[in-house]
């Protein structure tokens, strides 16, 4: 061992960490308008801004077609009865604001922010869009062409391609199998379809609006009622996407990408939902395995083996199901050994208890990371916007840390068995098949795509 | 000269310089029980020697491999095990290390930063390991991905001619493989002196208690020579330099245009107009290039513009660039796109921008600045860079006001300057499947 520069002045012992009292919840007001729109306003006055998140559930029982839904999100802000695209964008910019929209299988999401003094104008703009988006034919045509190009660019990314292959393998014909439309679905979508979709889907029933920032919660509620009161519901409660069947465990799927210098490894399986009793334990098991830098996966295939830069595992939540993903991009020649190490770490945590010290570190990280991510206006707004549509809210920010601290080693062991057992996961390997499939077949059964 | 009062969001900045030269900034804000700690060293990609491209970044990785009293991986496990998050990043002119922590773990953060400023602990095995990790980082971010390194790695060698400004900051694999522990020792001794660093703590802290803790952890580190910072200045291109790259993975072409701008550390009234010009051209659907290139002429699918080749407008010294980047359909000729860009710059230069347009751009600028300061770590990092490069952390709180004072004719003049000077054009041709 060689030291860089002589050690000078020995430091004392590593300082102990003092635990603070739990943070009290910020002042808030939660109301539901007659239209069915649920509104949560939270005061967090870090900077003089306000963050806005709107989540509109996919209305109706039939799943929303992905092509028109995506085109709707891309063109929602391109004009209203009163203003064209440029006037609308100028109005948003003049309040220091930004607004954007996105669609997925569960909902349409609108997000943005503005200088806090302009909250009423921001809500006015939102109301104008929700009740009067015009989807001008010229803008729809232009966005449709651009969207096709952007989809081609998105799908050229190996991470996107591998994820698409994994979701298709896990979810089959269920809407969760696809996050982006095919180009043909977009080019076939018409302005008429988008306007009809807006009329049926962009409704207040079951929608959730979160405002976080330098605001007075009660005054903000009054402003929302005044500005968004005209956005109507249908009176029909929307239905969630049905739960997908449990993902099957299938042989590793090798997707050929000739000449690829890395193999994009993605593994997936089912995970508990936030409201499930075993969720905190599963989150801890995921952290210990690969959910943060101090995890076993990082220690093994990055810091010990040097196979990869950013190995990780994570839990993503849909309204009807949650997904565990294990991800690593490894140089082609170590694909098989990397899979062996990943399976080793998965098998270990699925069958042997996690030592107390390792588990406690993950607990403290999970509690601290939640506190840090909800200490900002944007982070708190996004967290609450994810919680409210599934029946959770501000209390989760107190209850979840408690659950994390109280989960027992036995509960974590059980959760790890359900979440991380390698036999229950499916893998996709996107890379140079000629260079790696032979080695991979020697360590695990494969299928060629 | 009296210092203008800081805004309410930076009410009580405290500053000191320790005997060993370490500059310290404290920014108390007790609204949430979290703190951000940032340490910036005044060395970056531009300072790495020829034959050692990528070394500043590799060295950043080595700073997490253990120090005098901390074992490999312990830096991560201690911070994260205390409920914190952490990272480091390498830039053209600086390298930063930072953590966000529950305020009860502030002392731990200071200890760990002081320990690796005191001395690193390196082994051949850890060096070889991190060379492999960095190589995988380059593969995942550049070699295995379409548009990898576009334009931050590919544009500098067109815009600049000297090694410090033009070379690839991620580094060549051969250079990374050739790196030795002796190189690291030299780099640490030369650039990682307390006097070459700035430490900022922002968030839930008591100024007196924290100053004492900083003194306790860092005060005993001996002062070391601080290298004079060389000028990296070079003449701007006097005409158009143009290069074509084929990206075998990209499905659509793209183009990046680079111009030179005034010294960022010169008078702000000369520099800010270029920053605002970027927003006039490409911030949002009401901007000039969005309207012209994307919406009207359909020459581009996406466009961006602004000061900074790698990072933002306020974390870099001279020379830097103003970069316009566009993705475009395969059937669009680059020269048509460039002609439309020139026409829009001419329009700003001759017809100017009206008051309402400038006001909304300034409002958006202010909101963006505020938003980036909302997290303790964002605030700590920005304060550190303003201290290191400009000696004035409070400037962070003044920027929004200064942006509102930029006169319209200065923005028009900035556009005229871009048109009058040389430029670099990097065409990326799509070699991938549609």
Image (cartoon, rainbow, N blue to C red):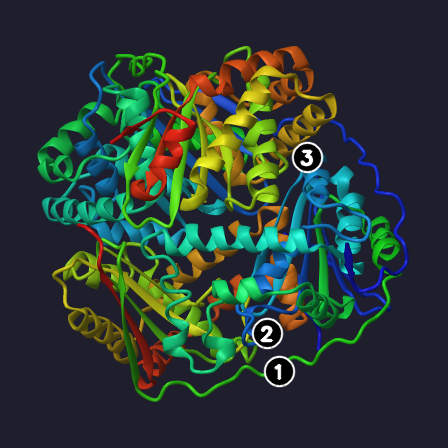
Q: Position of residue B322 (x, y in %)?
A: 39, 72
Describe the element under mark 1 as helix, strand or loop: loop
Q: Position of residue A121 (x, y in %)?
A: 38, 43
Q: Marks 2 and 1: CB-CB under 8 Å?
A: yes
Badge 2 or badge 3: first in the primary sequence: 2
Q: Position of residue A15 (x, y in %)?
A: 84, 41
Describe the element under mark 2 as helix, strand or loop: helix
Horizontal side of B5 relative to B355 (left or right) equals right
Badge 2 or badge 1: first in the primary sequence: 2
Badge 1 or badge 3: first in the primary sequence: 3
Figure check: B283 above or below A386: below
Tag 1 subunit: B
Describe the element under mark 3 as helix, strand or loop: loop
Figure check: A177 above or below B62: above
Tag 2 subunit: B
**Residue at the disc numbered 3:** B83
Which numbered mark, 2 or 1, is in the foreground of this view?
2
Residue B79: image quadrant is: top right
Q: Nearer the viewer, residue A21 or A189?
A: A189
Q: Nearer the viewer, residue B411 or B2?
A: B411
Residue A439: image quadrant is: top left
User: Gap in Å between the C-alphas at discs 2 and 3?
Assistant: 35 Å
Q: Position of residue B105 (x, y in %)?
A: 76, 40
User: Gap in Å between the C-alphas at discs 1 and 3?
Assistant: 40 Å
Tag 3 subunit: B
Badge 3: residue crowd in 10 Å (few <14, some 14–19, many ≥20):
many
Q: What residue is rendered at 61% in x and 38% in y? A: A299
Whether marks 1 and 3 lie on the same chain: yes
**Residue at the disc numbered 2:** B47
Mark drawn on residue B230: 1
Horizontal side of B428 relative to B156 (left or right) equals left
């Amino acid at each position: 061992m060689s030291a860089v520069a002589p050690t000078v002045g020995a430091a004392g012992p590593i300082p102990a960490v003092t635990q603070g009292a739990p943070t009290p919840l910020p002042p808030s007001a939660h109301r539901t308008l007659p239209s069915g729109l649920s509104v949560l306003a939270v005061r967090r006055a870090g900077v003089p801004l306000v963050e806005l998140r709107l989540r509109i559930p996919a209305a109706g029982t039939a799943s929303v077609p992905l092509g028109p839904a995506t085109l709707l999100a891309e063109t929602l802000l391109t004009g209203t009865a009163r203003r064209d695209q440029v006037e609308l964008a100028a109005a948003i910019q003049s309040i220091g604001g930004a607004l954007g929209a996105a669609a997925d299988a569960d909902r349409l999401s609108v997000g943005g922010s503005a200088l806090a003094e302009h909250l009423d104008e921001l809500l006015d703009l939102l109301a104008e869009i929700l009740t009067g988006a015009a989807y001008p034919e010229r803008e729809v045509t232009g966005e449709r062409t651009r969207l096709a190009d952007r989809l081609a660019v998105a799908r050229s990314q190996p991470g996107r391609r591998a994820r698409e292959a994994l979701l298709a393998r896990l979810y089959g014909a269920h809407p969760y199998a696809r996050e982006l439309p095919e180009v043909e679905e977009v080019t076939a979508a018409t302005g008429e379809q988008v306007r009809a979709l807006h009329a049926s889907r962009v409704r207040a029933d079951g929608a959730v609006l979160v405002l976080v920032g330098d605001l007075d919660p009660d005054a903000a509620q009054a402003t929302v009622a005044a500005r968004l009161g005209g956005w109507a519901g249908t009176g029909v409660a929307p239905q969630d996407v049905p739960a997908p069947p449990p993902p099957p465990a299938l042989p590793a799927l090798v997707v050929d990408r000739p000449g690829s210098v890395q193999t994009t490894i993605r593994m997936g399986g089912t995970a508990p939902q936030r409201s499930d009793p075993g969720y905190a334990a599963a989150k801890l098991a995921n952290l210990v395995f690969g959910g943060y830098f101090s995890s076993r996966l990082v220690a093994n295939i990055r810091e010990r083996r040097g196979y990869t830069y950013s190995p990780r595992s994570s839990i993503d939540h849909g309204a009807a199901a949650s997904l565990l993903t294990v991800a690593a991009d490894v140089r082609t020649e170590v694909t098989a050994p990397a899979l062996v190490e990943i399976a080793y770490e998965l098998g270990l945590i699925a069958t042997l208890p996690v030592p107390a010290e390792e588990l406690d570190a993950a607990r403290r990280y999970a509690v601290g990371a939640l506190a840090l991510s909800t200490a900002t206006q944007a982070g708190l707004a996004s967290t609450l916007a994810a919680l409210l549509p599934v029946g959770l809210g501000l209390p989760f920010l107190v209850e979840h840390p408690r659950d994390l601290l109280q989960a027992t080693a036995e509960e974590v062991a059980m959760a790890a068995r359900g979440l991380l057992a390698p036999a229950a996961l499916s893998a996709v390997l996107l890379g140079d098949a000629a260079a790696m499939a032979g080695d991979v077949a020697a360590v695990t059964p494969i299928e060629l795509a | 000269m009296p210092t203008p009062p800081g805004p309410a969001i930076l009410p009580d900045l405290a500053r000191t310089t320790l005997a060993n030269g370490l500059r310290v900034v404290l920014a108390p804000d007790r609204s949430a029980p979290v703190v951000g700690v940032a340490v910036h060293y005044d060395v970056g990609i531009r300072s790495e020697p020829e034959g050692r491209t990528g070394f500043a970044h590799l060295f950043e990785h080595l700073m997490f491999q253990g120090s005098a009293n901390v074992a490999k991986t312990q830096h991560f496990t201690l911070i994260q095990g205390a409920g914190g998050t952490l990272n480091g990043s390498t830039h053209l002119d600086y390298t930063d290390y930072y953590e966000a922590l529950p305020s009860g773990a502030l002392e731990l953060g200071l200890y760990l930063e002081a320990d690796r400023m005191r001395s690193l602990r390196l082994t051949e095995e850890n060096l070889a390991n991190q060379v492999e990790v960095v190589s995988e980082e380059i593969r995942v971010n550049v070699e295995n991905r379409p548009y990898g390194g576009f334009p931050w790695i590919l544009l500098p060698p067109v815009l600049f001619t000297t090694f410090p400004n033009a070379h690839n900051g991620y580094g060549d694999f051969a250079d990374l493989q050739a790196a030795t522990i002796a190189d690291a020792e030299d780099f640490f001794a030369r650039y990682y002196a307390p006097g070459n660093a700035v430490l900022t703590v922002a968030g839930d802290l008591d100024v007196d208690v924290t100053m004492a803790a900083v003194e306790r952890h860092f005060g005993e580190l001996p002062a070391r020579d601080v290298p004079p910072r060389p000028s990296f200045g070079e003449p701007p291109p006097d005409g158009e330099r143009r290069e074509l790259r084929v990206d075998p993975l990209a499905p659509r072409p793209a183009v990046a245009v680079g111009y030179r701008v005034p010294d960022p550390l010169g008078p702000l009234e000369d520099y800010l107009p270029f920053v605002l010009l970027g927003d006039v051209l490409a911030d949002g659907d009401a901007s000039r290039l969005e309207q012209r290139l994307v919406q009207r002429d359909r020459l581009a699918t996406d466009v961006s513009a602004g000061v900074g080749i790698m990072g933002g407008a306020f974390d870099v010294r001279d020379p830097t660039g103003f970069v316009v980047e566009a993705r475009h359909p395969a059937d669009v000729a680059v020269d048509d796109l460039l002609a439309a860009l020139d026409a829009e710059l001419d329009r700003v230069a001759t017809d100017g921008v009206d008051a309402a347009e400038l006001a909304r751009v300034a409002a958006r600028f202010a909101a963006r600045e505020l938003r980036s300061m909302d997290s303790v770590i964002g605030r700590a990092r920005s304060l550190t860079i303003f201290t290191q490069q400009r000696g004035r952390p409070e400037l962070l709180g003044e920027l929004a006001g200064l942006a509102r004072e930029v006169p319209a004719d200065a923005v028009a003049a900035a556009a005229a300057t871009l048109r009058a000077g040389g430029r670099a054009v990097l065409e990326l041709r799509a070699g991938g499947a549609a």
